[in-house]
């Protein structure tokens, strides 16, 4: 099935792209979540017009994200947690916790942008990658300290 992306979909494309996907993937996942529209003649003609507008918006968003990435490179957040024996955390620090710490610091970042391979379970300084856009990312220092 030929569809037009309404939003960025990882491993598929960016907004405005015309992509071919399997019928089941489109019907069961993409269409119910309103991530795509079916590519008929009317939609293809309208997307060509909207593509020019989207490109301007995408360039402005990329510039904003690059500026935010520079600010986040300089920023570090501190998260305090209870610890047990051998300074092991009770629980862990997840992407939700990091997004909340960034929000408390004045930065609005979606928790899905925080890229953690595994949750943080030890004290110390950890470098976390924030993927703001496919080509824009920032490294953030997260200090995990003992809660008093």
Image (tube, rainbow, N blue to C red):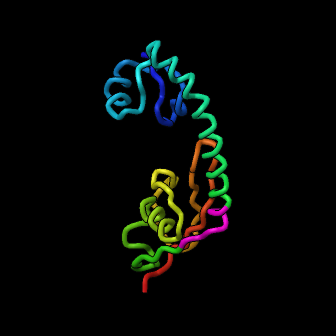
- In the rendered image, residue 81, in percent from the top left (x then y), is placed at 42, 76
Instruction: Please report the residue visible at 51 percent of the width from the left and 51 percent of the height from the top.
Output: 113
Q: Position of residue 6 (x, y in %)?
A: 46, 32
Q: Nearer the viewer, residue 17 or 59?
A: 59
Q: Is residue 76 magenta?
A: yes
Q: How many marks?
A: 0
Q: Which residue is pictured at 52% across the width and 17% down the height? A: 45
Q: Nearer the viewer, residue 97 or 125?
A: 97
Q: Position of residue 99 (x, y in %)?
A: 47, 62
Question: Which quadrant would residue 74 be assigned to in this image?
Answer: bottom right
Segment colored magenta: 71-77
At 55% from the left and 71% from the top, the residue drawn is 77
Q: Residue furthest top?
A: 41
Question: From the image, which quarter does the N terminus lie in?
Answer: top left
Seen in the picture, residue 143 relative to 22 is either above or below; the reply is: below
Magenta segment includes 56? no
Residue 84 in the image, given as x and y percentages of width and height: 39, 79
Residue 95 vertical placement versus 3 (above, below): below
Quarter of the image with the C terminus in it: bottom left
Q: Residue at x 41, y 78 (%)?
A: 83
Q: Look at the picture and state if 137 lies above or below 70.
A: above
Compared to residue 20, the image places residue 36 above or below, namely below
Q: Is residue 146 left or right of residue 77?
A: left
């Amino acid at each position: 099935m030929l569809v037009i992306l309404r939003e960025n979909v990882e491993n598929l494309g960016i907004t405005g792209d015309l992509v071919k996907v399997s019928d089941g993937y489109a019907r069961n996942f993409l269409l119910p979540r309103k991530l795509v529209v079916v590519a008929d003649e009317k939609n293809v003609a309208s997307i060509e017009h909207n593509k020019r507008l989207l490109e301007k918006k995408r360039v402005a968003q990329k510039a904003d994200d690059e500026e935010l990435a520079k600010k986040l490179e300089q920023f570090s957040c501190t998260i305090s947690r209870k610890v047990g024996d051998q300074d092991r955390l009770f629980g862990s620090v997840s992407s939700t916790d990091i997004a909340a710490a960034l929000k408390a610091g004045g930065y609005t970042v979606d928790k899905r942008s925080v890229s953690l391979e595994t949750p943080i379970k030890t004290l110390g300084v950890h470098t976390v990658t924030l993927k703001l856009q496919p080509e824009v990312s920032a490294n953030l220092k997260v200090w995990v300290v003992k809660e008093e």
